[in-house]
Image (spheres, rainbow, N blue to C red):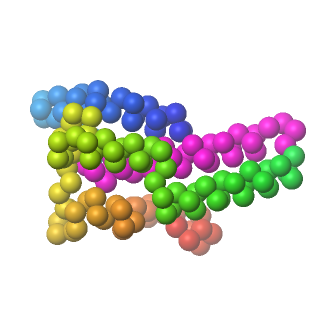
Amino acid sequence: MGDAVSAIIRNYEALLLLTSEEAALGDPTGIGLNKQLSSYVNLALVHLACEVLAVTNHLSKVFQYRDVCFSTVRGNLNDCIETLEDLRNNNGPVMTAMEAEINAAPRGQFKGAQIDFQPWRGEPDQRQKFSRGEIAVPRPSHCKHQGTFPTC
């Protein structure tokens, strides 16, 4: 999963160009994808997912070893939790690089593409909203883990 998210970041310009061409032809999927890809919040969430998956993928691979030693896993689990808690308060390298590129580019651009920072329906600026952690992640209406996890 982490490789797929990294590929979105690496191929961002090409994806945005393709979806904008499809949107110009009136394709509803192209219009929707282009709008999502050019939104600051979604761009930041993809970069954040890359950071988180880099940490959790390593832990997942440790659990998949044939001769897994649970005393070793405990140390890896604690490291993973510590790193994720650090990411809650501080940007990791991927988010830092994204912010640096946005700040260095002309206002409203990322990798040469126009990014939408505008608020949605009376909400605060997307950058401020994301930095304060006020992003509402849509939850499925029928979660199979209802009541098991606090996010369901």
Name the residue rendered at 21%, 68% in the picture: 123
Name the residue rendered at 17%, 28% in the picture: 21
Asked if residue 52 lies left or right of residue 19, the reply is right
Name the residue rendered at 36%, 67% in the picture: 132
The spot of residue 126 in percent (x, y) is: 26, 59
Q: Main secondary structure of the magenta part?
A: helix
Asked if residue 151 lies left or right of residue 19, the reply is right
Q: 80 or 119, which lies in front?
A: 80
Give the answer, above or below, for where 142 lies relative to 14: below
Q: Is residue 47 magenta?
A: yes
User: Which of the 4 quarters of the picture holds residue 27?
Assistant: top left
Give the answer, above or below, for where 149 lies relative to 24: below
Asked if residue 43 lies left or right of residue 62, the reply is left
The spot of residue 57 in percent (x, y) is: 62, 42
Specify the segment rendered in magenta: 39-68
Name the residue rendered at 39%, 42% in the picture: 97
Q: 104 or 32, which lies in front?
A: 104
Q: 52 or 67, which lies in front?
A: 52
Q: 112 or 37, which lies in front?
A: 112
User: Which of the 4 quarters of the picture holds residue 17?
Assistant: top left
User: Which of the 4 quarters of the picture holds residue 65?
Assistant: top right
* Residue 35 appears anywhere in the view: no
The spot of residue 141 in percent (x, y) is: 43, 64
